[in-house]
Image: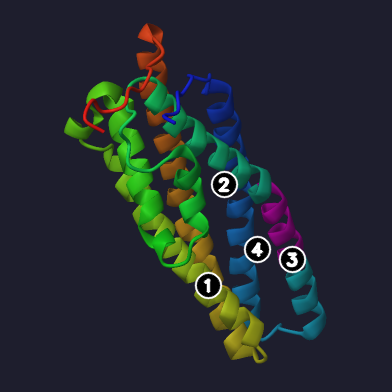
Amino acid sequence: MLEQYNYKPMGTLAGFVNTMLMIYLTISVASIVSSFMMIDLLSTADFNDDLLQLYLQRDAVLSMVLLIIYIPTAIGFAKWIHRSNNNARALGAISLPISPGWSVGYFFIPIMNLWKPYHAMRDISAASRNARNWYSENSLPIVLIWWFLYLIALGVDRVGGRMWQKADTVETLTAAAQVCMIGTLIGIPLTLAAFSMISQITKGIEEQSNDYEPVVPHPHPYS
């Protein structure tokens, strides 16, 4: 049975995700400052365990705040991807190769999560330019920038996390803090790229929705 897709408003959802991204960005800047101060402390003669514990506690609080913000942001982003795919199909891009569900699901499939989510967003961005002829459109450049930064940030965060778990000396603690700070720094342009991507795709899809008429898929006459 061929599924019919109905257009659903996405401006409010996109606004929520972008607001959360900006909050996340603000806390990330505070986390970077905290990490820099801890690295500076570890390299000075004034270093002592009590002061280090104070810095570690502050860093742990900031990390917890980032996690609390990250969860609703990630859920909202996933919903936005699903709705963007659904709306692109409703506007005429019924032949998109990746379904709304798998546009999100591929993020959780090992190995395939290294390229499939990008393919989904690439096609959605092309549809945001012209849903009925999405296959003849180029994807938005911001999508590739977002994905490139996402993969780098993901790799750096994993390396930094492993280093942090094994850190048991001043030298290894300093190295782990430096790598984690680099990961957070990369997160700044990544967050801005995600903000821009969401804004551009949402605008493109909403502009096409002004002439929205339900697209009813028909089976191929020779199927």
* Res. 214 visible in picture: yes
Choose the circle earlier in sequence order: 1 or 2: 2
| Residue contact at pointers 2 and 3, CB within 8 angstroms | no
Q: Is residue 7 above or below residue 134?
A: above
Image quadrant occupied by the N terminus: top left
Q: Nearer the viewer, mark 1 or mark 3?
A: 1
Crowding at dot 2, Cα within 10 Å, few <14 / some 14-19 / many 20+, comes out as many
Closer to the camera, 79 or 109? 109
Q: Is residue 193 above or below residue 124?
A: below
Query: Please, what is the three-letter code of the amino acid marked with disc 1?
Result: Arg
Q: Quick check: is 42 in the magenta stretch?
A: no
| Residue 97 image label | none
Q: Which residue is mark 4?
A: 34
Horizontally, residue 212 falls left or right of residue 58, namely left
Q: Which residue is mark 1?
A: 158
Residue found at x 42% / y 18%: 206
Q: CA distance from mark 4 to mark 1?
A: 20 Å
Expressed as whole percent of the image width and height from the top left, the position of residue 174 reads: 58, 81
Which quarter of the figure has residue 169?
Answer: bottom right
Closer to the camera, 213 or 159? 213
Choose the circle earlier in sequence order: 4 or 1: 4
Expressed as whole percent of the image width and height from the top left, the position of residue 97 reads: 32, 42
